[in-house]
Image (tube, rainbow, N blue to C red):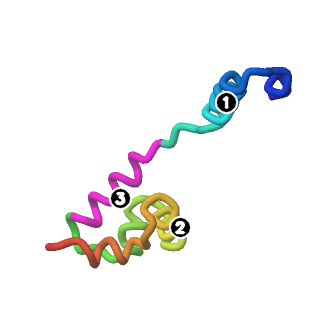
Amino acid sequence: MMELFNLTNRAQQIEALEEYWLSKLKEKDLSMMENILSVIETSDLKTYEVAQQFNLSRQYLHKLFIKYVGNPPKRISEDTPF
């Protein structure tokens, strides 16, 4: 990161910053969330039952949904047409 300050060309600085921040990103495995969404969309299980199926607490499932989906699991199940 310190070499960024030694660069005089603005384009090189931008490129170095982009490389730095991209190196900090971590690849996320969202396959579990995809599986959970599939179960919610194809069944009429309650939130706590879905959490139990994936060995999660209901609170943690809620937290994951807010973080990765933007809505709580109940909202997703309500919006899913059956």
Q: Which residue lies at the image location 43% right of the left edge and 47% below the top edge?
A: 30
Residue 57 or residue 71, whichever sits in front = 71
Of the two numbered discs 2 and 1 in the rendering, the one whose residue sits closer to the viewer:
1
- Of badges 1 and 3, the one in the foreground is 1
Sequence-earlier tag: 2 or 1: 1
Residue type, numbered disc 1: Ile
As displayed, is residue 32 above or below residue 52?
Answer: above
Q: CA distance from mark 1 to mark 3?
A: 39 Å
Kind of element beneath mark 3? helix
Q: Which residue is mark 2?
A: 63
Magenta-tinted stretch: 29-41
- Residue 16 placed where, x, y %? 69, 25
Predominant SS of the magenta segment: helix
Q: Is residue 74 magenta?
A: no
Point out which mark residue 36 bears.
3
Mark 2 and mark 3 lie on one chain; the one further toward the N terminus is 3
Residue 49 against residue 21 in the figure, above or below: below
Give the CA distance from mark 2 to mark 1: 35 Å
